[in-house]
Image (spheres, rainbow, N blue to C red):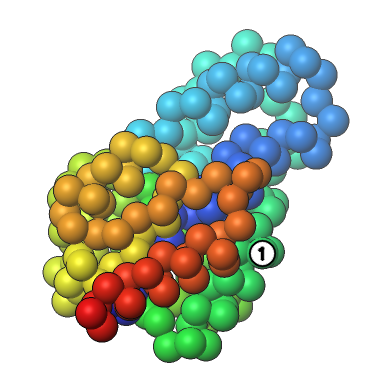
Amino acid sequence: MIKNIIFDLGNVILKDKPSIILENLNLGDEVYNDIKENFFNTWSKLDLGLISLEDFFYQCKFKSIVSDNIKEKLINYYKYRPFNENVLNVLHDLKRKEYNIYLLSNNNKETANYLRKLDFYQDISGDVYSCDYNVIKPNIEIYNILLNKFNLIPQECLFIDDNQSNIETALKLGFKAINYNTLNDNLSLKINKYIDEENEWFKN
């Protein structure tokens, strides 16, 4: 029986990828592509918690001049990144129905610390961020960290992520899983259908 719902952040709770913030900065094509390629495409050190966003910014080899205003937006991008409000509504509804809600995310320390202070965290039972443990999905170790930290049973967990590799690791451990596509999927319908089917099987 499903008792725990585990959400990814990017492309699930948060809209699109972090580079979505570039759409609102009125950048020319050259600067836009320069920043996207150099700042947003290689985040493994950030997700592993090995470097701060500001230090990472100064390590980027930009070909264009990046103004102080743009720098501020980049190193604080998480403050400008939009949420999927429909997913937050689903999450809140699941919490109201007394499911335990967890987050399992590849993310940097600044983003993790910021998100933990937001109102939606009142619905979160616990989280595991890659930056806190120096390991990223789809490495099986980070899933085991989540299970052990909160004493979870894989067969009682429904995992929601947009990345098939992350889904496959969860399935290997015995999780139930939904590969979520924000453009095409009705998340509430998918979750309820899954839970109803699982609970019916459990009763039988």
Residue 98 percent across, percent down from the top left: 43, 88
Q: Residue furthest right?
A: 26
Residue 81 percent across, percent down from the top left: 66, 50
In the image, 64 versus 41, the foreground residue is 41
Residue 146 sits in quarter: bottom left
Residue in the image at 54% along x and 30% along y: 40
Residue in the image at 62% along x and 35% along y: 19
Residue 164 percent across, percent down from the top left: 37, 38
Question: Horizontally, is 125 left or right of 19 in the view?
Answer: left
Q: How many marks?
A: 1
In the image, 168 versus 88, the foreground residue is 168
Q: Can residue 78 be seen here? A: no
Amino acid identity at mark 1 = Asn
| Crowd rating for badge 1 (residues with CA inside 10 Å; few <14, some 14–19, many 20+) | some
Q: Can residue 42 be seen here? A: yes
Rendered position, 28 above or below 75: above
Residue in the image at 42% along x and 33% along y: 43
Question: Horizontally, is 73 left or right of 88 in the view?
Answer: right
Assign the C terminus to one quadrant of the image. bottom left
In the image, 6 versus 9, the foreground residue is 6
Rendered position, 64 above or below 10: above
Residue 174 sits in quarter: bottom left
Residue 203 percent across, percent down from the top left: 26, 83
In the image, 97 versus 9, the foreground residue is 97
Q: Residue under circle 1? A: 86
Which element is circle 1 on?
helix
Assign the N terminus to one quadrant of the image. bottom left
Residue in the image at 52% along x and 17% along y: 61
Residue 145 sits in quarter: bottom left
